[in-house]
Amino acid sequence: MILQIFNLLSTTVLVAAQLSPALVPKQAPKPRLPKVDENACPFEGCQFGEWTVRKPVRLFSTWKHKQTPLRRLAKGEVVRALTGIHITFAPSEISVTAPMPQYGLKPGDTVFGYMNLGEGFFNAWFKGMWVEEFDGSAIVPGCSRNCSARLVKPGTFELWVQLRTRDGVTGWTKETDSFDGKDALGRLMPNAGQTQRSVPSEQRLWTAAGRVRAREAALADGVLRCCAVKTFVMGALLQSLSHVQVAQDPPGAVSISFALFGIE
């Protein structure tokens, strides 16, 4: 049985070692501003498709500076969201307060945050390196323990979405908080039987604090979102551990096993 557990842990370590390129820092110049990200849907659960207007929305010819108004969408109107443009006018500034060895960062270093990806991850640049999916779960505000950085200056962002009306008009709006249907996770909660309250996109943009709070709220409602690989391996490990005399293991063995999964 101990051999089985060892094999499971070895497999987990191997999977963890094969990191996605998006998680690995790579050399890159600091992005020029404004930074424009196309086909952007910058929060967890974001989805294009059918959206319903909750309050009147202005539709423009383009997301760019030289734009003309097209029409006003009425409450209750159903439109199709086609794509999004995320603009970073100024990145968020984050000060490192404790070593972050996974990124080679030390206290006093600065991380610049760009587009949010959901669940505390965001695009980041620091010390000549770019990380497509930077883990911001240790950033204050939002982090409550084992924190290693703090938000010094919030960034300035805009999100524009291209919409097509049922009568064939295509235009752009940045009033994305005026729609239902954009959040795939904002459907009926399994326990409450009520629609999840929407969160303004301005509060969601990249910040780890917002994502951590959203994750905690979801957990409180009985919703657990995590990596499928982690769930499968952790379940197998727990099943194996249930047949093991824990007292016979070396001190700290179980806690070390859990630590591999980021569980304390």
Image (cartoon, rainbow, N blue to C red):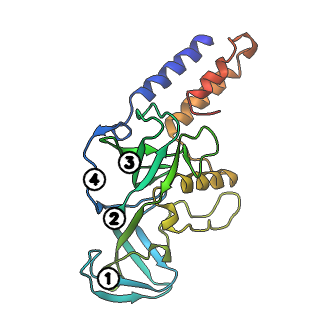
Residue shown at the point (62%, 65%) measured from the top left: 196
Q: How crowded is mark 3: few (under 14 residues within 10 Å), some or many (20 or more)?
A: many
Q: Nearer the viewer, mark 3 or mark 1?
A: 3
**Alpha carbons under labels 3 and 4: distance apart:** 10 Å
Residue sitting at x 73%, y 10%: 248
Position of residue 245 measured from the top left corner of the image (x, y, whole percent): 74, 14
Task: Name which residue type carries label 1.
Answer: Phe
Q: Is mark 2 on a helix, strand or loop?
A: strand
Give the vertical position of 64 relative to 183 (above or below).
below
Q: What residue type is labelled 4?
A: Pro
**Label 2: few (<14), some (14–19) or many (≥20) C-alpha neighbours in 10 Å:** many
Identify residue for label 2: 87
**Disc 2 to disc 4, C-alpha distance:** 12 Å
Q: How many C-alpha atoms fall within 10 Å of the one at disc 4: few (<14), some, or many (≥20)?
A: some
In the rendering, which numbered label is found on residue 31?
4
User: Nearer the N terminus, badge 2 or badge 4?
Assistant: 4
Residue 253 percent across, percent down from the top left: 65, 17
Q: Where is residue 143 shown, x and y percent of the image? A: 60, 46
Looking at the image, is mark 2 or mark 4 nearer the viewer?
4
Instruction: Return the mark for residue 214.
Output: none
Task: Give the answer, above or below, for where 103 lies relative to 59.
Answer: above
Does the residue at mark 2 contact the one at mark 4 (Cβ under 8 Å)?
no
Which callout, 4 or 1, points to the residue nearer the camera? Answer: 4
Residue 53 in the image: state x and y as whole percent. 48, 80
Circle 3 sits on which residue?
A: 124
- The Cα atoms of the two marked residues, 3 and 2, are separated by 14 Å
Mark 3 / mark 1, whichever is N-terminal: 1
User: The residue tagged with tag 3: helix, strand or loop?
Assistant: strand
Q: Which amino acid does label 3 sit on?
A: Ala
